[in-house]
Image (cartoon, grey):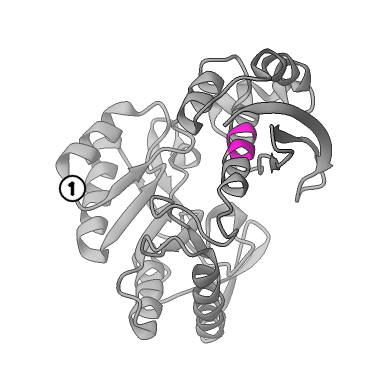
Amino acid sequence: MMLADYRINVVLNSRAKWISEYVLINEDGLAGSGSAPQGETLSHRELQMAGQASVNSAAAVDSILKSVRGSDFSQLEFDELLMGSDLAPADVFALSCAFFDLEYQAENTPRHMVPESVRFCLNLLNGGDHAYTNPVRCDFHELLLVPPPHGDCRQSMEDYLRINEKVVDGLKRYPKTDVAGNRVADIGSGANKDVIAFLNGIRADDGISDYGLMIDASGTDLWVDGHYCLEIADQKRLSAPAFVDYWLQLIEQEDIQYLEDPFHEHDLESWKRLASDQDNCILVGDNLH
């Protein structure tokens, strides 16, 4: 793919903050665009780089794009160039998305189809201190379902709307309680395991056994004074080795197939042990990376 030109726009994200949107243009005049979403939580590295907000680093992006104008790149080559630069993570992500979008348009691929290697993460329950959408009393920020690798965005969205309606109806049966100023559903005994079982029940009822269960634990937020504190639901304070055992048990009992940020981003020994002591669950590093 030859990059013939580019534009840098300034747009508002979903949190009403100004960010950069990057538009890459090929020799045929096709344009692909990309911008970076803002997560609910930031890693320590992102916090340290907060001064390099996307709008402020537009000059650095401009310099890189000028240097590659007229050059041919594959997606991998372009991503390697970005990763080897000093750009902020949000800009690397946005530019990679813009290149991906441009390649798809150049290949005339229907916009609702993506490579089968892409996995959608359908957020269905929210816990922690940020329990806003389908809120439940749970120590983990997000519980999600991951569709099988069919590559069809449209099918995944149709499934999501149907499953989400069942989740909303199911939550109406439970009493409400307050967590960090939010009214949330108090499922079962209030333990994390009960919340997971609720979503697994929805999965079974809908007949989507090929959908994988995923948890985003945001482990860095659980780390307090050298322990993992599950204060909202499980009422536990666990050492790092004990928290690895906690995850091993949940993975086996609840069929968790994807686990995002189960530990503090600097607790590498726990990451290594959980990865080596089981092979049924894929560990996803968000804040870790």
What predominant SS class does the magenta segment belong to? helix
Q: Position of residue 168 (x, y in %)?
A: 56, 80
Which residue does the numbered mark 1 point to in the structure image?
Answer: 279
Q: Which residues are magenta?
A: 95-99
Q: Residue at x 46, y 42 (%)?
A: 222
Residue drawn 71% across the image and 34% down it:
25
Question: The residue tagged with tag 1: helix, strand or loop?
Answer: loop
Whole-percent x, y for residue 221 in the image: 50, 40
124 relative to 214 in the view: left or right:
right
Figure disc tally: 1
Residue 54 shows in the view: no
Q: Where does the N terminus fall, quadrant-wise?
A: top right
Of all residues, the one furthest to the front in this rendering is 28
Q: Farthest left residue?
A: 277
Quadrant of residue 38 in the image?
top right
Judge whether residue 232 can be spotted in this image: yes
The answer to whether residue 168 is left or right of residue 274 is: right
Q: Which residue occupies the foreground of this view, 233 or 273? A: 273
Q: Residues within 10 Å of mark 1 (few under 14, many from 20)?
A: few
Q: What residue is drawn where x is 25% and y is 56%?
A: 251
Q: Nearer the viewer, residue 85 or 102?
A: 102
* Image coordinates for residue 207, horizontal then vertical, percent: 34, 82
Is 71 placed left or right of 227 in the picture?
right
- Please name the amino acid that badge 1 sits on: Asp
